[in-house]
Amino acid sequence: MQKQLGQEVADAIEWSGPRLLCIAGDFTKYDEHAVQQINRNIELIRYKRYGDPLLLLELVNATTGDPIDDTGSGNSVKPKVVYKRFEELLAQASTELRDRYEALKAFLTALGDDVQFKQLKYYVAFRRLKNFACVEVHPQNGQILAYVKVDPSSIALEPGFTKDVTKVGHYGTGDLEIRIKSDADLKKAESLLVKSYEDS
């Protein structure tokens, strides 16, 4: 991959959380059982065609493995800045911020039975077939950043609360950043989180 796309692209990939998508017309109960036994990120997706224009993708089974520790991977290029991992940042957070994060997590996972939670190195992701919310915790300023798949041009941006990050580098996916600094912000963010979930 490094030869095809270059070192810069290879360095930007989070190798600690590879994901395998198996797409087929159907799976046996043995396939589903085998996936459950393997401690890796594997998803079984069944497809069904409805004529020419329609294709249904159904998530049959998904497992989430532990992140791979890549600190000793032997990569020759190391990042210049060392970022703290998500679990370290959450451990440093105040009780109030941790409680707010747990409330956000509970809200996102309750949106549907198909919601999957994945903790990555620097953030956590909530997804259906694709991520619909990526969340970072920032204990130094007592806020939570949520990146969602809502078109920033489709809403009225509110300074200090929502921001267009279409052309701004950040972890996770989504073009709209939501800054959650209070319980009131969390309540206000719910409609945007639901929209991102429904559109994913």
Image: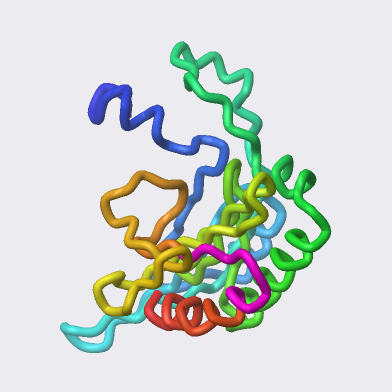
Q: Residue at x 32, y 61 (%)?
A: 164
Q: Residue furthest left?
A: 52
**150 and 68: which is toward the camera:** 150
Q: Residue at x 44, y 15 (%)?
A: 77
Q: Residue at x 26, y 88 (%)?
A: 50
Q: How many marks do you count on the picture?
A: 0
The quadrant of the picture occupied by the N terminus is top left
* Direction from residue 75 to residue 157 in the image, left or right: left
Can you give x and y, in whole percent of width and height, for residue 187 in the image?
A: 60, 81
Q: Residue at x 72, y 73 (%)?
A: 103
Q: Is residue 33 above or below residue 65?
A: below
Start-end of magenta stretch: 178-186
Q: Residue furthest right?
A: 95
**122 and 185: which is toward the camera:** 185
The quadrant of the picture occupied by the C terminus is bottom left
Q: Is residue 87 above or below residue 165?
A: above
Residue 172 lies within the magenta run: no
Q: Is residue 200 above or below residue 12?
A: below
Residue 179 lies within the magenta run: yes
Can you give x and y, in whole percent of width and height, for residue 5 in the image?
A: 25, 30
Q: Residue 125 is drawn in which quadrant? A: bottom right
